[in-house]
Image: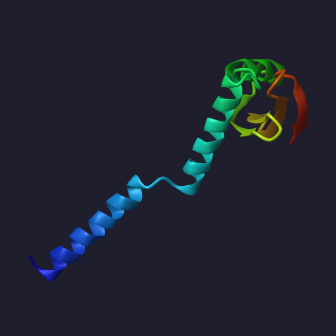
Amino acid sequence: MTMKHSILITGLAALAAMAATPSQAEIGQRGEQDAARRAMLDGQTMPFSLIKRRVDAAMGGATYLGAEFNPSSNRYRLKYVKDGKVVWVDADGRTGDITGWAH
């Protein structure tokens, strides 16, 4: 094997390893999802689908982009786009009630 091939193979192996390693954002998101699931299974929060349905109804056709869960407060923060603006909606995980809005 030539030096050029050896460098190429080493580089490809390094790229493959990087692609297989989850990013910090993916790790954080997975932990957040696990915490939300545990809270729901423990009866501390409603199922997210019910909370999202309630918030969607209040958002009047806004486009849903994603959500974050805060396990220490059992609150969700849902992200939408409405009329070209990003809107964050806070919801109580226990009741599904909207507790705040931020633009």
Residue 16 higher or lower than 86, as above or below: below
Q: Quadrant of residue 67?
A: top right
Residue 59 higher or lower than 17, as above or below: above
Q: Nearer the viewer, residue 86 or 35?
A: 35
Q: Residue at x 81, y 38 (%)?
A: 87
Q: Quadrant of the C terminus?
A: top right
Q: Please indicate whether residue 86 sits to the left or right of residue 98 in the image.
A: left
Residue 53 higher or lower than 90, as above or below: above
Horizontal and vertical percent position of residue 21: 43, 55
Q: Nearer the viewer, residue 72 or 63?
A: 72
Q: Nearer the viewer, residue 94 or 76?
A: 94
Q: Residue at x 66, y 23 (%)?
A: 41
Horizontal and vertical percent position of residue 53: 73, 18
Q: Residue at x 66, y 31 (%)?
A: 38
Horizontal and vertical percent position of residue 80: 74, 34
Residue 43 higher or lower than 39, as above or below: above
Q: Nearer the viewer, residue 87 or 74?
A: 74
Q: Quadrant of residue 74?
A: top right
Q: Residue at x 61, y 44 (%)?
A: 31
